[in-house]
Amino acid sequence: MSRTRDVTDTRRRLSDAVFTTLAERGPTGLTLRAVAERAGCTTGLVLHTFRDKRALLLHARDVLHERTRERSDALEGGAGDAVAAVRAVVLGTLPTDDERLAEARVWVGFLAAALDDPVLAERHALASRAFADRLTRLLEVGPGGRDEAGTRAAALVAAVEGVSSLATGDPGRWTAARQVQALEVVLAAALRTSAPR
């Protein structure tokens, strides 16, 4: 039992180290040595778990996707209706606190690394599509059908990703209040009963 707990603790420590290292150092600073230092273990142990940098990056992206999916599930489940769910999910994605700012930094770092790696690019695209699909499903409740809901969801995704990128690069200017104000403009347009033609 103790051995199983030790293995679980080690995996959790390594997982946290990968995620935090990417958030703090970006893709160029995400090295086996940096992860080992943060986790308090040898590079051999890191290499035993993650065979290369791509594996580190993929793990960080998977952790990010799981965290944001769980948060969105909870926000959607706690909302009274589809409109409230869209608002909660969209605003809950913004990097308005330290935890979500770290998540945004992982997102930006992963995207930068994915620019010249088709495997990373595909993983990024799948996770981004899952977010867009969630919003499309929630927006379909209103008039206009799936195509219109998809267009409004795309506008929201673009706004969230744009604001998150800006807040990651300039958190002093893109305060939590400014992020929410910017998204409220797009939310107001996206939550109207029909998209502009």
Image (cartoon, grey):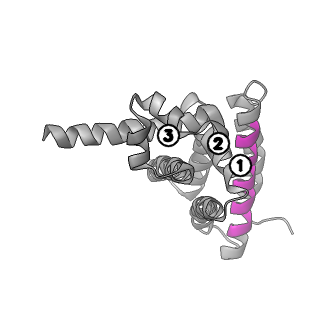
Q: How many marks?
A: 3
CA gap, disc 1 and disc 2: 8 Å
The answer to whether any part of residue 95 appears in the image is no
Which stretch is magenta? 149-166
The percent coordinates of residue 84 (x first, y second) are: 57, 50
Q: Quadrant of the N terminus?
A: top left
Task: Name the residue rendered at 29%, 37% in the picture.
Answer: 9
Check if residue 168 falls in the magenta segment: no
Task: Determine the residue located farthest toward the right in the rendered image.
Answer: 197
Task: Name the residue rendered at 77%, 30% in the picture.
Answer: 170
The answer to the question of whether label 3 and label 1 lie on touching residues, with beta carbons closer than 8 A, is: no
Residue 36 vertical placement versus 7 (above, below): above
The answer to the question of whether label 2 and label 3 lie on touching residues, with beta carbons closer than 8 A, is: no
User: Mark 1 — residue?
Assistant: 112
From the viewer's side, name the closer residue of 140 and 115. Answer: 115
The percent coordinates of residue 126 (x first, y second) are: 59, 64
User: Mark 3 — residue?
Assistant: 18
Residue 158 vertical placement versus 150 (above, below): above
Task: Determine the residue located farthest toward the left in the rendered image.
Answer: 1
User: Majority secondary structure of the magenta segment?
Assistant: helix
Type of the residue with mark 2: Pro
Task: Name the residue rendered at 51%, 53% in the picture.
Answer: 55
Mark with earlier residue (1, 2): 2
Q: Secondary structure at mark 1?
A: helix
Mark with earlier residue (2, 3): 3
The answer to the question of whether label 1 and label 2 lie on touching residues, with beta carbons closer than 8 A, is: yes
